Image (cartoon, rainbow, N blue to C red):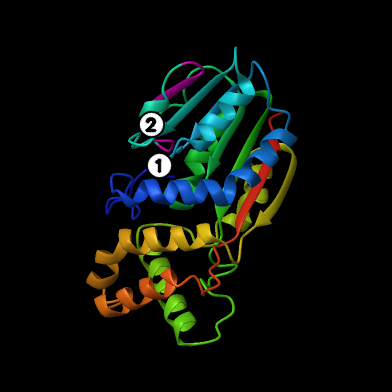
Amino acid sequence: MAEHETDRGYLLDNRQSEAGIRFDALAELFDPVTFRHVDRLGIGAGMRCWEVGAGGPSVPLGLAERVAPNGTVIATDIDVSWTRDIDGGVIEVLRHDVAADPPPPGGFDLVHARLVLVHVTDRTEALRRMVQALRPGGWLLLEDADPGLQPLLCPDESGPEQRLANRLRSGFRTLMAARGADLAYGRTLPRALREAGLDDVQADAYFPITSPACAVLEDATVRQIRHQLVGEGLATDEEIDRHLANVATGRLDLATAPMISAWGRRP
């Protein structure tokens, strides 16, 4: 789920087949957290929502269920490959770069982005445009990863399989940072929302440590970035094959980086 590619390109390209697998795994892992916050903020029938960097369809569809029949969900991304089929009814899908394009017209009761701004080079401008799009009283809900807070794929580094997994995760972080990702961005969200002038700012964090969806996500992610890992000398093909085989056993306790959710209201 991402907007705004750097000059070197977004590492986890939506056009690759593994992207759909990743979106499904991310939905399983994080949709319950996202919609717990959405419901707590009172998003319901007739409201207008902007889903920034939608990536997959699960969040726009969940928002549509809540705002139907007379509300609106605008789902935007730089690549709408995985959302174009849900366009229609209360959902409108638009190709859009959050840091470069004007916000969609009309004020919004909710603007939401999940695992997006960590990848956007001009995060400050993207945040400014999202706040600008809020109606008075509207909520901004940002959810982003903080790999720096918990950098390990296997927090219980108990053997060679876990050490290999953590070394490949370190390579993944190296590739992300080289493309402009801020690996400590999640922790800054509460301050960023206050500095943007929002009221009632709160935040929490969540990350699974063992889940079948974590294994699915890891397999798809490694396959998606395999060429870059090998090309940059961060791993060998043999190491990647061995890691994927270890993941397939289901015996590794795989974690994600913490996802920090922060929300604030426009006065």
Please state if 240 lies on the left or on the right of 90 as rendered.
left
Label located before the other in sequence (1 or 2): 1
> Viewed as shown, does residue 225 lie left or right of 40?
left
The residue drawn where x is 50% and y is 50% is: 26
| Residue at (68, 30) in percent of width and height | 266
For the point 42% across and 69% down, which residue is it? 248
User: What label does residue 3 carry, if any?
Assistant: 1
Q: CB of mark 1 within 8 Å of CB of mark 2?
A: yes
Q: Nearer the viewer, residue 175 or 211?
A: 211
User: Magenta stretch: residue 213 in it?
Assistant: no
Residue type, label 1: Glu
Q: Let me know if residue 133 appears in the view.
A: no
Examine the image and state in which quarter residue 20 appears: top left
Say few, some or many: other residues with alpha carbon within 10 Å of mark 1 (under 14 / 14 to 19 / 20 or more).
Answer: many
Give the Cα distance between marks 1 and 2. 8 Å
**Percent position of residue 108, x then y:** 59, 23
Q: Is residue 190 above or below residue 254?
A: above
- The residue tagged 2 is 96
Q: Quadrant of the N terminus?
A: top left
Residue range in magenta is 89-99
The local crowd at label 2, few if under 14, some if 14 to 19, many if 20 or more residues have their Cα within 10 Å, is many
Looking at the image, which residue is at 67% across and 18% down?
45
Q: Is residue 224 left or right of residue 251?
A: left
Q: Quadrant of residue 181?
A: bottom left
Position of residue 171 measured from the top left corner of the image (x, y, whole percent): 38, 72
